[in-house]
Amino acid sequence: MERSIQPKAHEQELCDDLEAPYASERMVVTQPAQANGQELLKMVGIHKWFGRVHALRGVDFTVHRGEVVGLCGDNGAGKSTLIKVASGYHAADAGQIFFEGREVKLRSPKDARALGIETVYQEQALCPHLSIARNIFMGREPTTVLGLIDQQTMNEESMQALASMGLRLRSPHALVSALSGGQRQGVAIARAIHFKAKLVILDEPTIALSVKEVREVLDFVRHLRDQGVAVVFITHTLHHVFSVADRIVVLAHGCNLVDVYTKDTDVDELSDIIARGTLGDAAPTTQHAR
Amino acid sequence: MNSQPIPFFVRFRNIGVLVVLIVLVAGAALLTPQNTFIREANLKTLLALGPEFGIIALGVGVLMVSGEFDLSVGSQLALGSLIFISLAGAGVNIYIAALLTCLLGVGIGLLHGLVVVKARIVSFIATLGFMLTWRGLTEILTAGKVRSYDFAQHETFVQIFTGRVGDTVPSQVIWFALFAIVLYFVLHRGRFGNWIYATGDNVQAARAMAIDTHLVKMACFMIVGFLCAFSAILQTTRTSAVTTHAGTGWELQAVAASVVGGTSLRGGRGSVIGVFLGALIIMVIDNMIVQARLPYEWSYAAFGVVILAAALLDLGIEKQIQRATA
């Protein structure tokens, strides 16, 4: 049986930076998966330098409306950097970003958020000693005519937002430190969709979670998709992303490596590619019987 | 959520602080020689002098919630007093002089904030440097001598800041309560207060939600600077003089008041009511030691023990919270 992900010889120069140490390897990308939906976020030829480190070497990345995209790759592949460019944390040194068809400049997280891109970071998302409601409205607190926080609106809307994720918590006043890891992810995701996110980026949402909590988080992702929200799901754990993602993008050494529909591949094939960081069939491990 | 209930005194921390205050007042009343603590004269002195410290402690508490320290409050008080008395002595309208002193206090706070957030010097170290800088500057400018000025000519001004309301309650208490109420609304009921908590609790989360944490911290330093200047005006008006060692030791007493009142040393937790009560506790201990005719050095030991005990208690409470929710 043939491998479903085939390197394409004529696309040898996908890693733009030919001086890069890895350019000599056969860094080849597959045909990008063609989604039916409209393009929501499109990043083209993104480069990012940190001092002398070339973290992103001309990466292309597209997310369609209502699509769940898994973003994978080994440590240092450039996943986090790409996501930080998409969420306005880092400015790209070169490349273009389009959102809903228009070219945009993301100078700060505020810019990204204004477009409807919300990013949920694993450890950085919530304030443990603040209540659920205060976390959900952090930085965007509704106020009464007197300029004071409108606690009642905050409480009601946060319970609604949580319920829309299928998450039933006792009270909006409970401190986040009282929640399980899965519930915390739920609160952070509920916050994102409450503010009408069109694209939610989840950075390692299942890391350090129990099996039951992972299942909760994957359910949250399905809830998001059901509401028409696009999701980028970054993870090391392919099994997690396989159960929810429509498409999987793999980066290696700051370059695109794979872009494939989940249904056209499987966990073994992808984990093998990620581990080797290349599609090249020179390595003996690719010869396993399939 | 299948969590155990949080113990009463952990959930209602301020009630615990209030109980400590009441026990302390009762103890002071019973144990001071001839019960001098609860004599009217002493209570009036306590309520006139105490707020000078309490007002500063409120600011320090809010700053600590944002996750920063200011160890230079005592020095800011001395410098502020010197500026105020110099302006008054130079014939500047007394209200303008007070206003300028407060503005200068805000400016000093801004400088502290800039050094901490822009130069990224840990506030503990940065304000330790400023503690010595401002104290040294005050000493240089006064050449170590007491500066005095007769405020009696500004009758209304004296009445507003150090007079009595209804012939009994010192104005300072009203100011203390007023600042506590204002800061309560700022910290607990306003948007900005939520940003202060978020900044102190998880600065990355706050930043991710587009909260300008640098601005939040600078504003908190400015609040402290303003309150130090205001307290300097109260103190200078009351004593008609400025000494270079005004406010010595207050920086740690203010931290103690905040921690006793339930403010976390790591930021993100604390309340204005707690700091208000904590400041009262420190004021009472300070006064008690004087009334018990113990040498003043005892107060250092007492505050040291209080800080340690409060920090230990805080650790225990944090553990309780985690256990209750695990």
Image: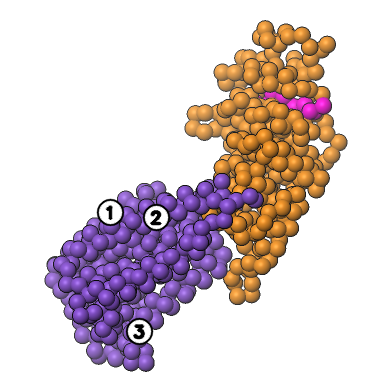
Chain colours: A orange, B purple
| Position above or below: B175 against A195 | below
Q: Are marks 1 and 3 on the same chain?
A: yes
Instruction: Tell me the CA gap for discs 2 and 3.
Output: 34 Å
- What secondary structure is found at the residue carrying circle 1? helix
Compared across the picture, whether A71 is left or right of B284 comes to: right
**Residue plotted at (54% across, 56% down):** B6
Using the image as rendered, state which of residue A158 and residue B211 is in the foreground.
A158
Q: Earlier in the sequence, mark 1 or mark 2?
A: 1
Q: Earlier in the sequence, mark 1 or mark 3?
A: 1
Q: Nearer the viewer, mark 2 or mark 3?
A: 2
**Residue plotted at (56% across, 46% down):** B326
Q: List x then y, in percent, for residue B271.
A: 47, 64
Q: Does the segment drawn in magenta span residue A18?
A: no
Instruction: Tell me the CA gap for discs 1 and 3.
Output: 34 Å
Q: Main secondary structure of the magenta part?
A: strand
From this viewpoint, is residue B184 visible?
A: yes
The span picked out in magenta is A254-263
**Residue plotted at (24% across, 73% down):** B31
Near mark 1 (Cα within 10 A), the count class, few <14, some 14-19 or many ≥20, is: few
Q: CB atoms at circles 1 and 3 under 8 Å apart?
A: no
- What secondary structure is found at the residue carrying circle 3? helix
In the rendered image, the quadrant that contains the C terminus of chain A is top right
Using the image as rendered, state which of residue B282 and residue B139 is in the foreground.
B282
Q: Nearer the viewer, mark 1 or mark 2?
A: 2
